[in-house]
Amino acid sequence: MNAPLLPEILLGVDTSAEPRLPLASEGVLRYIWESRYGPMLIEVRAGEVYVNGARVQRIRPGAGGPAS
């Protein structure tokens, strides 16, 4: 994926009286991906990727992204 890293963006109609909670927290990057199959939560914690709370296994052990 070569998309630029953008700040969090929340889309949708907010009809609740509750305030929105931020996606960002210290040391964790979070993204909501809207696809035709529904929304997915993508998190990066300590260099590991999680989708909907499940850790994503790398294809090659120790293989990093473009920076490695």
Image: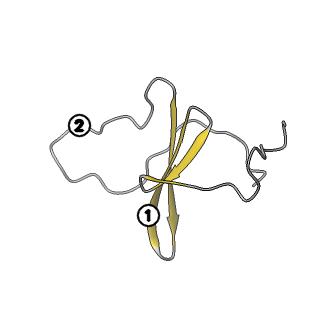
Tell whether 58 sits left or right of 28: right
The amino acid sitting under disc 1 is Pro
Q: Quadrant of residue 66?
A: top right
Indicate the position of residue 17 as horizontal and vertical percent values. 15, 44
Q: Are marks 1 and 2 in contact (CB under 8 Å)?
A: no
Tell whether 9 sits left or right of 47: left
Residue at left offset 78%, top offset 51%: 2
Residue at left offset 29%, top offset 39%: 20
Tell whether 61 sits left or right of 42: right
The amino acid sitting under disc 2 is Pro
Distance (Cα) linking label 1 and label 2? 20 Å
Which image quarter is the C terminus in? top right
SS state under label 1? strand
Residue at left offset 73%, top offset 59%: 59
> Which mark sits nearer the N-terminus, 1 or 2?
2
- Residue at label 1? 39
Which image quarter is the N terminus in? bottom right
- Residue at label 2? 19
SS state under label 2? loop
Q: Quadrant of residue 39?
A: bottom left
Which of 14/7 is in front? 7
Question: Which mark's residue is nearer the viewer, 1 or 2?
Answer: 1
Give above or below for 48 relative to 60: above
